[in-house]
Amino acid sequence: MEVPADIRLQVDKLRQEINAHNRRYYGLDDANITDQAYDQLYRQLQQLEQQYSELESAESPTQRVGTSPSTHFESVDHEVAMLSLDNAFDVLEMQAFEKRLCDRVITNKAPLHFTAEPKLDGLAVSLLYDNGTLIRAATRGDGKTGENITANVRTLKSIPLVLKGRHLPTRIEVRGEVYMDHAGFEKLNNNQRQIEGKVFANPRNAAAGSLRLLDSRITARRPLTFCSYAIGWVEGYKLPDSQFQRMQYLSTLGLPISPYIERVMSVQGCLDYRQQILEKRDQLEFDIDGVVFKLDDISQQQQAGYVSRAPRWAIAYKFPAQEVMTKLLEVDFQVGRTGAITPVARLEPVSVGGVMVSNATLHNMAEIARKDVRIGDVVIVRRAGDVIPEVVAPVIEQRKFELRLPKMLTHCPVCQSEVIKPEGQAAYRCTGGLVCAAQRKEGIKHFASRKALDIDGLGDKLIEQMVELKMIQSIGDLYHLEMPQLSALERMAEKSATNLLKSLEASKSTTFARFIYALGIREVGQATAEALALFFRDIKALMATNFETLQEVDDVGPVVADNIIHFFEQPCNIEVVADLLEQGVHWPEITAPDPINALPLAGQTFVITGTLDGLSREQAALRLKQRGAKVSSSVSAKTTAVIAGEKPGSKITKADSLGVDVLSQSQFEALMATVA
Ligand code: IVH
């Protein structure tokens, strides 16, 4: 068929565009396009190439995966190419997949079986084990040649350095995905912001960036995880002839496999599985972008064979994208519980991961400046897990006109008090305190929330209404509410009022940790509240504590300690606590044995001095405290050991004179590894 000139041009342009995205995605770890938009480009090109066979070319991006590796790492030639997967986006495409298979494989009229797993959103890695020992790890690269990242991969705790079991192969090449979970990703980015390092757009980029660091000591501190999903090749062992059983075999060798792996029957089984995983998606601790189905019978896999880029016997059934593009219409400001003023993006409504989103957080003004987000921009919005949707970045290429940067307000949008930016903090704050209705509302919402006192039937709207009507001013007022007031409220039926009073009564019976958390002290989350509860066991002890003692608590550094002290210095907070207790809020005594004593370094005291490589003294102290040790600032005869970094100073001399051990950084790391 004669190819029209405009089609040729379109195909050329698509190829260039996809190549450029591939270079970014696979080479530079800095994608500037959503998966959805990329898939669209890719499919458009695929369709045109199918329609006009003359346009087919070995150089087309549809015929290969990614681009060549960068020059920083040694190259590794994959003995067996690392392929990609074909995608399906709907039921019809899944049926077409099954039909293609039925046309090619001998089924003896039996239904096809598939191994089903989530499609992890990280990056593919190949692991080579020789007589059970990990001897090489490589990225996929362009599928034929990857990069040798053995030093980095050896730092991943989920990857065994030596295989276990009685059926070791002579050599085996295992493939799987390296990824970062949500908690690790958030923590890493927060840390990167603090040190003004690179902030990653999503866990996939963070995983890719972390694996391709030239210094494996930094990789070691990145929260990376591995999950196996295939065997490249094997010598010296006869593998089972089912994909599912092969995965079980990997598991017996000590390699992690997906806990969600299942064997399903025909397309219907695949669809049911997809639905089941889709429903779990938001609760998963990591990003997945679909589910993968692989023909279970290995001889059927062989009959189905390969196309250049992917096996015919497998398919990825994609989920709705968790990152999509939309327009940023306006930036508004919201006042939080602690007065922090957060910029909120008002967006042209768009479906993200299957949920309509019209607002997203922009975090703070520094983030807006760093990302250079402007009103009117097309932006990438991400929504994953139970994290609130956020604006990841603007799509600068689509900015046609000069657009304005959002500006912080000088006065609180709710109470008109002055807005200030405290030294060294990222957030601007409303100075209104309890004068500010927004802060009061948020404080009460927090107190009533599920993880705090869990007051059933006291929703956000109701709280807002009651604060506006001045029925409640602070959390203490909740327990003074009475029937006549409640039933006078608009849309409050008598039954709901009775139920609310009942759940208020029920909420009085709580735990010490929940109570501390519910007070809403700045930066005291659930984990810190639990640590404080275990440490102090008693509200009076907590209220009377001092700055030094607080820092002995796990997870509490100077900033949090300061917030706690400041909180209990405010007369209004002391009054609220007294009022709550008087109203009958109570909790069982904490009798659990002090967990600190059960930890490996319990009873030991360390002093840290000098500069540690790639680790702040606070971080090192946290690692020690997590293992039950105490960290002190001065050396005494009671000190277990001094940990000395570069330029340690006089503490070493003191340690020497007292006969206290001095550990180098590597000895410290070794200690951490043995008492992990
Ligand atoms: S199988 C020959 N299984 O998706 C089959 N891939 O889009 C090769 N991926 O390169 C891949 N989870 O990085 C397979 N359970 C899974 C997967 C998975 C994630 C990634 C992998 C692959 C890409 C293809």
Image (cartoon, rainbow, N blue to C red):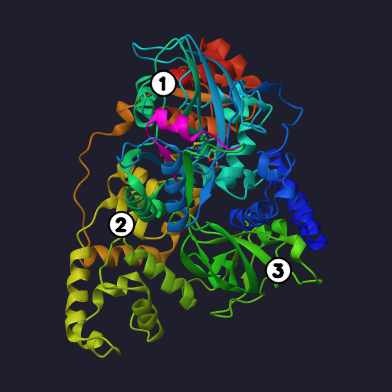
Left or right of 151 in this view: 623: left
Q: Position of residue 106 (x, y in %)?
A: 38, 35
Residue ID for mark 2: 515
Mark nearer the viewer, 2 or 3: 3
- Is residue 359 on the magenta stretch? no
Q: Quadrant of the C terminus?
A: top left
- Is residue 302 on the magenta stretch? yes
Residue at point 43% right, 73% down? 440
| Circle 1 SS class | loop
Estimate how packed mark 1 is, as few (under 14), some (14 to 19) or many (20 or more) residues with alpha carbons within 10 Å.
Answer: few
Query: What's drawn in magenta, residue-wise?
Result: 287-307
Measured along the vertical axis of the image, is residue 353 above or below residue 482? above
Estimate how packed mark 3 is, as few (under 14), some (14 to 19) or many (20 or more) residues with alpha carbons within 10 Å.
Answer: many
Residue ID for mark 1: 675
- Could you give the CA–CA distance between mark 1 and mark 2, rounded to whole angstroms? 33 Å
| Circle 2 SS class | helix
Residue at point 44% right, 24% down? 605
Which residue occupies the foreground of this view, 386 or 592?
Answer: 386
Q: Position of residue 77 (x, y in %)?
A: 66, 22
| Residue 117: numbered disc | none
| N-terminal-most mark, 1 or 2 | 2
Mark nearer the viewer, 3 or 1: 3
- Determine the image quadrant of residue 627: top left
| Circle 3 SS class | loop
Left or right of 99 in this view: 417: right
The amino acid type, in three-letter code, at marker 3 is: Asp
The amino acid type, in three-letter code, at marker 2 is: Phe
| Residue 377: numbered disc | 3
Estimate how packed mark 2 is, as few (under 14), some (14 to 19) or many (20 or more) residues with alpha carbons within 10 Å.
Answer: many
